[in-house]
Amino acid sequence: MPAFLLTKEDTVATLAFNRPEKRNPLNVEVLREMEELLHIVRDDPAVRVLILTGSGNSFCAGADLSAVKGITTPQERQRVFHAQGMRRTSLTARAAMALHGLEQVTIAAINGYAVGGGWVMALACDFRIAVEQAEFWFPEVDFGVPLVPEGCQLLIDVVGSARAKEMILTCRRYKTAELQQMGMIHQVVPAIQFHETVTVLAQNLAGKKQEAAGWSKTTINALARGQQVLRSDLLLRRE
């Protein structure tokens, strides 16, 4: 079974994590494949919107914990998890930044658990729509590893440093309604309305002028990081 399903309907592509039996976890192979598929989407001129979602009842459960299954002592779990962490951390950062840097508009359709690196991937998207029963948390500190710096930055971009410290250091679980109040989730919908809500938003965004939407997204991302952007008079001359 492939780790992802990449489909396209007109100008909207959907990339779905596809290991539902394990709640769509991340490992080295999955992250490499994700980065490759994001490059395919990036280079496809027909794609205007990308939907990132998960198969089954989870969005993405974060790091693959198969290696620590059955280990009962926290110290040993941390040791094994940390030993695998460096390569996975680097690839998580690369995939998240590839997603964040897409010129196409991106929607995280969060259909269940979004944990650790999976929550980072949702934060890397432009819009986040979640089902009511979804849950979110960063377990990294409990496993003795830091959240990837790129994930910290994406979180700070949305909620600021004080909230980011709370979420990362406490490893607390959050419900969708609470995160919507923080501005992290754009829409919370019942499961029965989820697909329709995501589809309507995707079609609306796909109908916008692609160049204008792409430049606007790039400008907003740059300004949010305090980076220099193209002056308005030079931008208008390009059109």
Image (tube, helix red, strand yellow):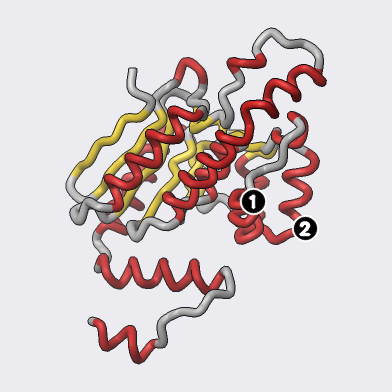
Tell me the residue at 41%/49% (across/down): 107
Return the residue found at the far top: 70
Asked if residue 225 shows in the view, the reply is: yes
Q: What x and y, as percent, mark residue 20?
A: 45, 20
Going by the numbered disc 2, the residue's amino acid type is Ala
Q: Quadrant of residue 101?
A: bottom left
Q: Quadrant of the C terminus?
A: bottom left
User: According to the image, label 2 marks what residue?
Assistant: 162
Q: What x and y, as percent, mark residue 48?
A: 27, 56
Q: What x and y, as percent, mark residue 34?
A: 40, 37
Q: Quadrant of residue 158?
A: bottom right
User: In this orientation, which residue lies closer to the viewer: 174 or 103?
Assistant: 103
Going by the numbered disc 1, the residue's amino acid type is Pro
Tell me the residue at 60%/34% (across/down): 115
Q: Earlier in the sequence, mark 2 or mark 1?
A: 1
Q: Secondary structure at mark 1?
A: helix
Count of numbered circles on the image: 2
Tell me the residue at 32%/45% (across/down): 199
Q: Secondary structure at mark 2?
A: helix
Image disc number at residue 89: none
Image disc number at residue 149: 1
User: In this orientation, which residue lies closer to the viewer: 192 or 231?
Assistant: 231
Q: Are marks 2 and 1 in contact (CB under 8 Å)?
A: no
Q: In the rendered view, does 174 fall on the left or right side of 134?
A: right
